[in-house]
Image: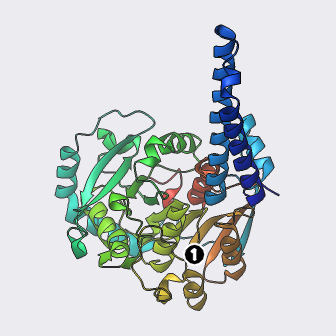
Amino acid sequence: MGPTSALVVLALCAVAAGVVAAVVALWRRLAQPAGPGGVAVRALSQLLVVLTSVLAVAAMLNRQYDFYTTWPDLFRQLSGASPAQGQQSHAGAAPHAVAANGSGRAGQDLDRAADAKYAALRDATQASLSLRPHPGPKGQFVIVHVPGLGGTAGTGFRAGRVVIWLPPSYTDPRQAKRTYPVIEAFHGIPGGPRDWHRVDQLDDVLASVMSKRDMGQAVVVMPDYAPNGLDTECVDGGGIPMETWLTKDVPQWTISHLRVRATPKAWATMGYSAGGWCAAVTGLLHPHRYAADIVMGGYFRPEFTNWHPFAPGHTPARYELQRSIARTPPASDVWIQVATSDPTSGPQSQQFVRSARAPLSVTAFTQQDVGHRVAVYMAILPRALSWLGSTLPAFSSGSHH
């Protein structure tokens, strides 16, 4: 019987209700004697009501969202210890290593063509963003709006918000011609792209990984796939072309406005929870745009919360991702967290790893006794980014394009 057990929730709710009933029934008696002693007793009784009520609500939320699925995981969190360690394994094809320059001749041609075509627009964009010339090792965040979603199906939201992290060297005059690989990163639900900065401290993680030379400098693009709180699950549906915007409009805007590489071998996706699904569905359905994908706490079919673009039982076959890629496995490299105790992502992630076959290459990081929460994902993110730096040469610490 774990922390998400219905019996645990019912027991804590019963305790909270009992405490409330007891305090109400005994209130007059608790008021005696008058003076400081009576005040202290009444204050303690009210504190007990609040404490038991908070525990009951916390248990209900934990049962709903699977934050802590085992007692060891909860005790580690209470003691301040790190989440459980994991074990890495491999399935499917061998990693898709490419030439040391990370792209090959075709990729180099794409990069050179983009550099020539968009040089002026990239310079103008950098000037308009009012970037700090010396941001320090943590780089800097900027917010832009990318067209493609405005006024769709009467939703009323305008061009999509995108948060972008630029590495420290991006504004260094000595590296004014340098171009960068790109990670397209997806937040969880509920949430927004700013969570990567305000809650997740992604800049701290990136600074640490880059200082250890586990990964080279990259641009991180964080699109808002839940505009106005609408959980689109990153799909095209209900009149909102979210998948198209994420996989075509956002990359094209990024390539044309920022000093980034155009070759798919220099692009990857990354996400956690609902964002893990987004990283999988965008990356695996569009291997011509993304060469690698990092999936943490993800799943492999859309799980809509406050939006239902498809009739029951009529989800497009392409979004049943396990079946879709089983028929035609993409030549992609995937790093996936498999949390065996997480009912949200664990079973689907295990099935994904078991069914992986060439040309799909899957590196699984399996963890026992961890729940479905951001702290777990941020703790393993350095390992995932190190994998990216060692798998795709464009992301290696020695890559300077």
Q: Is residue 378 left or right of residue 237?
A: right
User: Which residue is nearer to you in this view: 222 or 189?
Assistant: 189
Q: Position of residue 109 (x, y in %)?
A: 34, 72
Q: Is residue 57 left or right of residue 316?
A: right
Q: Quadrant of the C terminus?
A: bottom left
Q: Helix or strand or loop: what does disc 1 sit on?
A: loop
User: Which residue is nearer to you in this view: 3 or 363?
Assistant: 3
User: Which residue is nearer to you in this view: 258 or 370?
Assistant: 370
Q: Is residue 181 above or below residue 78?
A: below
Crowding at mark 1 (Cα within 10 Å: few <14, some 14-19, many 20+): many
Q: Is residue 354 above or below residue 80?
A: below
- Location of mark 1 (residue): 300
Residue plotted at (43% across, 86% down): 311
Q: Position of residue 258 (x, y in %)?
A: 29, 55
Count of all numbered marks drawn on residues in the image? 1
- Colouring: rainbow
Q: Is residue 16 above or below residue 123?
A: above
Q: Position of residue 223 (x, y in %)?
A: 37, 59
The furthest residue to the right: 1
| Identity, as a three-letter code, of the amino acid under mark 1 | Phe
Residue plotted at (58% across, 91% down): 327
Q: Quadrant of the N terminus?
A: bottom right
Q: Position of residue 71 (x, y in %)?
A: 79, 49
Does the image show residue 82?
no
State the image quarter where residue 26 is shown: top right
Q: Is residue 272 left or right of residue 251?
A: right
Residue plotted at (40% across, 40% down): 139
Does the image show residue 54?
yes
Q: Is residue 194 left or right of residue 364?
A: left
User: Which residue is nearer to you in this view: 60 or 308?
Assistant: 60
Residue plotted at (18% across, 46% down): 128
The furthest residue to the top: 35
